Image (cartoon, coloured by chain):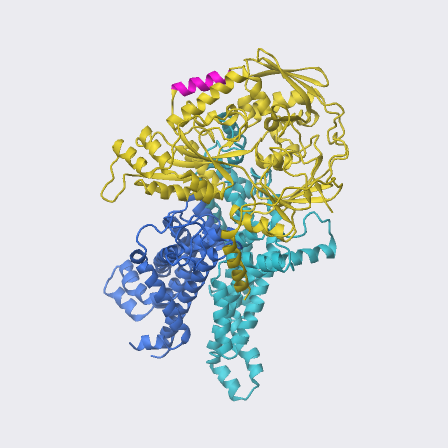
Amino acid sequence: MSVLTISRRGLLAGSALLLASTALPAIGRAQTPKKGGRLIVAADSEPRNLNPAIVASNGVFFISSKVVETLAEASFDGKDGLQPRLALSWQGAADGLSVTFKLRDGVKWHDGKPFTSADVAFSALEIWKPLQNLGRTVFKDLEAVDTPDELTAVFKFARPTPFQLIRNALPALTSVVPKHVYENGKIEDNPANNAPVGTGPFKFAEYKAGQYYRLARNDDYWGKDEPFLDEIVYQVLPDRTSAAAALEAEEIQLAAFSAVPLADLDRISKVQGLKVVTKGYEGLTYQLVVEINHRRKELADLKVRQAIAHAIDKDFVVKTIFLGYAAAATGPVPKNDPQFYTPDVPTYPFDVAKANDLLDEAGYKRADDGKRFSLKLLPAPYFNETKQFGDYLRQALAAIGIDAEIVNNDPAAHMKAVYTDHAFDLAVGPPVFRGDPAISTTILVQGGIPDGVPFSNQGGYKNAELDALIAKASETLDTSARTALYKEFQKMVAADLPLINVAEWSFISVARDTVGNIANNPRWAVSNWADTYLES
Amino acid sequence: MTRALALLRRRLVGSVFVLLIVVIGSFLLLEAAPGDAVDAYIVSTGGDAGMIELLRHRWGLDQSELTRLANYLWALLHLDLGQSVTFSQPIRNVILDRLPTTLILMGSATALSFGFGSALGIYAGARPGSFRDRFLSIGSLALYAVPGFWLGLVLIVVFAVDLRWLPIGGIETIASAKTGLARATDVAIHLVLPVSALGFIYLALYLRMMRAGMAEAWRQDFVLAARARGLPRRRIVLAHVARNALLPLVTMLGLQSAQMLGGSVVIESVFAVPGLGRLAQEAVAGRDTPLLLGIILVSAVLVVAINLLVDLAYAFLDPRVGASEAGT
Amino acid sequence: MRRLRRFFRTPEAIAGALILGLLVAMALAAPLLFPGDPQAIAGPALLPPFQDWSLPLGTDRLGRDMLAELFHGARTSLAVGLAAAAAALLIGAVVGTLAGFAGGLIDEVLMRISDAFQTVPSFLLALAFVSIVGPSLGVVVAAITLGVWTGPARVARAEVLSIRERDYVAGARVIGMHPLEIAFREVLPNALPPVLALSSVIVAAAILTEAALSFLGLGDPNRVTWGGMIAEGRAVLRTAPYLSIVPGIALVLAVLGVYLAGEGVVESTAVRRSLP
């Protein structure tokens, strides 16, 4: 009986979908923030290591960025897209060998000790540079951090390091942890990795595995009147369908990182009391990329790669797979990046006939069964959309006579198959653009990377010219010259197709109307939420 | 009594071998997996070659398989389950944290399916071939044929989202600081949906077994004799027919305990219940070999213990069972 | 002929046979009615059923024809069920016969191994096996088989134990037949009927296990299965419920049909055996 009721109502909703406009309710009304309240947020995974200074990833930031702060945060309107956090100002030397940070006064750690430049020096030298997944690249030439006084930290580099890169790395790579907590014993074994101590607006209160994380208000926070919330609770909801149900049942108030499936957004936006928010992820752009194994003789042929690029209907991908919540990509830098993006690159419009011609030219004629050759296609298992794109790509390749067999692996097996064993022909990956191509983008196409490095060029692609360009850009200090080099980089990648950039997407938040001040910076979901509030 | 003890001893010795096979088999299976704990960890973090090497060394994954198996078995002899790399905690703590939840969930679901199943089975089997017999046995079968996750999702939509009678998931109201009776009530309310989803699936099993057993019993001489003596039908049904059909159900209870644990993997995932089933799934995803071994071992011990209890109960209930192998 | 009539005595068995017949017909007709890849994109995405008569059951998230998927899904779901049942019965019958006929140490070892398999929750085993080897149809069948072969093995062993002391077995021994020949030519065929009676249960369990594995993302992505369709549709359970309800109903009916038909067979043979 109950099944029938749902089906009827659901069918009506289903047909309404076709008629629905794309308009979404307006975000947030002007209101004076209220103090107090518990914000309950959906969490779909449980990071074990919560130290953002070691693990600089969005899954960790989602929780720990409220506890541990960085030197600066991304901003919609601040200079260079930044706003101060623990650092008030940053100045790079002309020779690229030093960067000076002036730190905020009167900041206390959650255990009451004062925050000083010694903490910054310790975090940079002992953690970011040797232990952090991203810092190991960006801070590789960091030699020393001078602390002339308690509120000044001077980073000294052994080789000229572009200030632009350091600046762009500030929001994600510079979580400062207390020296006095970490200086004794092995940093990796420190209990504070599971119960972080920081300077942020919220203190880490408790973690119940499989159930929730709880953060409590830091009464000594440096921000005036902040934070507004008393508590943030992350409820662990492993199943992808539960977040929407929990929002509707008013058990949670916020689901970030597209925890509500895209296909459900239209319906949920019409639910009384819920709002769909597409802002607040501008600094967290994910790229949908077809990774190519250039060891396969067919794929080493540029014509074949061009044919594949022409066979992909980016418009279909954006409209059907991402339901419009994405943009078609032109190259390795996303369109929404304010500093580096250039549209002036070779493009590959959707053209099946041309793709077929290219393959004929390359000498891969269709056999009697209509197939030219077979491929193994490995879609990354992390997102619904990467898997759906895998299904689509298989069909798109079938249209040009390439027979692709999809291999589904769980994350660990995918990691091993693609990045260590190279047991793939094509893979679908979701690399993250982190505001500067040098942080995690050039590594996707650069040659000479050892086996086993995740989210890097493991397709065996080598291009001396491109490698030289990457090397040159990494030591070019002048901002405009450096930017120009990365524009050249985009052209070369789009022309030679070491990989195929298909689309760029960010995430969607769904929140109850009562949640205020959400999405007010480009990395909102992973920022500190000091000014977020709940109307009663 | 001595017969029961002999049975117990025999079974315990056998169980040690069984558990050893289970441990070594699972270890080899996990070793064959593509990707190890470091690969699983690096998925969410990224990192370079040096960092990967560092982690492999720290987690002891650079040792040979044989060394690790030997180390594991040696530690196991000292009742040490080892350290979980994904939780950075002793595995004993991780498992003990989840075990009560799973026991409550499985216990309640078993009670539900066994209780309702056998009661409805008696009701159906009291009149074999009647409309209610057919309706119940096909109805329960249809329920059995519904994939558990789907039943769970539908229950959530109806009872938690639309009617809002019950919470959508979890084991208790999060971070509520409830204690004592208030907490017990809270847990009970949270368990209604997952227990129903898990229990109703297996209900068919007991119901159908009960009515099949009863249909068989109706043809037996002693029942015919009881009817000839003119005993009231109600009394015949309960005292003679149903009682005879109950014994195989007890055996089923033991056999089913392992399957119930498997079924709870999916249910725990749908209802966000922090139990062993979900932990096992996380252990597989994280390639946390010692953790998965620990879970399999604990569940195997549970299953062995439950079956032992069932056998002992059987030995007491049915005098025909002796040292022979009947009842397994 | 008489057996057939006996089989069709109860309405349940008739219903079961009808459903099963329909299922087989769907599976056989799938490549004729819907030639080509059922996963090909055929129209606009998320088209509800009964809107467009060229796509009567609508389309899924990518615009694939639900009706074509349903027919091809019948093929795979049935294939998974039958293959798992055949493998489990074969392994079970061989192991059970060996254990029962050989006795002694062989029996002890084989039975402890089967105990070990029974101790580990079969779904957990299937889950671990598929996530480790990687999901493809063959692996899914193997994973399901791993969890269910012990049932047939135990039944076969029990049957063999009771048969092996019978006269004709003793006779075969006297004329000097090889023990293995006796086991597999004389004993096994006679022990088979009760083992085969388990097949419907196994087929049904296999179809359900495949669905649950698909739910956890462990189905074969190159094939359509009903379980995979339900699992994919569940994310939009409320926006487009038909995506999971249509294959859901098909799955429930199929499992029900297999069960009822299986029961009909068991009952008709059981009566025959009690009659002689």
Name which quarter of the figure residue A214 lies in: top right
Q: Which is nearer the eye, A74 or A432?
A: A74
Q: Residue A68 vs residue B279: left or right?
A: right
| The hue in which chain C appears in the rendered picture of the protein | blue
**Quarter of the rendering containing residue A166:** top right
From this viewpoint, which residue is outermost toward the top?
A: A95
Chain B: give its colour: cyan
- Residue A465 shown in magenta: yes
Residue B22 appears in the rendering: yes
Residue C235 image position (x, y, % from top left): 51, 50
If the image is split into quadrants, where does the N terminus of chain B sit? bottom right
- Residue B322 visible within the image: no
Based on the picture, tell me whether residue B263 belongs to the magenta stretch: no
Q: Is residue A356 left or right of residue C239?
A: left
Residue A185 vs A395, above or below: the answer is above
Instruction: Report whether B88 appears left or right of A114.
Output: left
The percent coordinates of residue A51 (x first, y second) are: 62, 32
Q: Which residues are magenta?
A: A464-475
| Chain letter for the yellow colouring in the rendering | A
Residue displayed at 72% across by 22% down: A116
